Amino acid sequence: MPLSDAQIVENILQGDASGFQELVTRYQKPVFGICYRMLRQREEAEDLSQEVFIKAYRYLRQYNHEHKFSSWILKIATNTCIDSIRKKRVDTMPLDEDIKTNHEDVSAEKAFLQQEAHREIESAIAALPPDYRMVVLLYHHQGQSYQQIADNLEIPMSMVKNRLFRARKLLKESLKKLKEETLWTAEQVQK
């Protein structure tokens, strides 16, 4: 039976540093996922992911065993990304990943439209202010609850709800504007 995160952390704190690789293996995908969605640049996301694990190792004694290790390390990832964005004021780019479809018989046109919709949504999320973008990513992409987000970001739950509400409103406005622009452009092309 595999050791729990808390048991691994305790072993590391007792001098068995080899267990840290197990924590890296368990959390490298979620940490990278947050970094990539926040920064939109693979290399920078990879660098920051490494930085997150270095910080986690360095500050492991400060980890509170009453909370989940996953929440703690994702909080470090979140804060590291926000710090990086604030330092660099990076303009984000849309995600250029292909959409994976569940049906092999999906037409090329439908797949293209799905991919375009995905890009538009990702672009709209990327354009959100960092604080709003983070709650959207944690809630919708990481599946965290309001309480988990509040704990990770060290903000009141009411602020999480407020940011998520405002982010959704901004996304809706942004996507509506994009749709209107697309329709206007299509009408101009047809004339």
Image (spheres, helix red, strand yellow):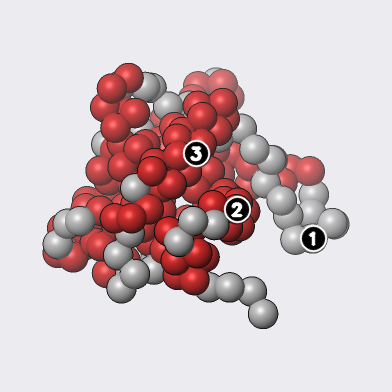
Q: Which residue is mark 1?
A: 103
Contact? badges 1 and 2 (CB < 8 Å): no
Quarter of the picture containing the C terminus is top right
> Where residue 63 appears, x then y in whole percent?
33, 59
Q: Which amino acid, by three-letter code, is at mark 2?
A: Ser
Earlier in the chain: of badge 1 and badge 2, it is 2
In the image, what residue type sits under mark 3?
Ser
Crowd tier of the residue under label 2, counting other residues whose Cα lies within 10 Å: few below 14, some 14–19, many 20 or above: few
CA gap between label 3 and label 2 equals 19 Å
Q: Is residue 187 visible?
A: no
**Local crowd at mark 1 within 10 Å, few (<14), some, or many (≥20)?**
few
Which circle, 3 or 1, is nearer the viewer? 3
Q: Is residue 167 above or below residue 186?
A: below
Residue 160, visible in the rendered structure: yes
SS for tag 2? helix
Of labels 3 and 1, earlier in sequence is: 3
Q: Amino acid at mark 1?
A: His
Q: Determine the residue positioned at 75% across, 61% down.
A: 102
The numbered dot on residue 18 is 2
Q: Nearer the viewer, residue 131 or 80?
A: 80
- The residue sitting at 53% across, 43% down in the picture is 32
Front residue of 53/184: it is 53
Res. 3 image quadrant: bottom right
The disc at residue 49 is 3
Residue 59 x %, y %: 34, 48
Q: As rendered, which of 31 and 126 lies closer to the eye?
A: 31
Residues packed near mark 3 inside 10 Å, few (<14), some (14 to 19) or many (20 plus): many
- Would you say 181 lies left or right of 46 here? left
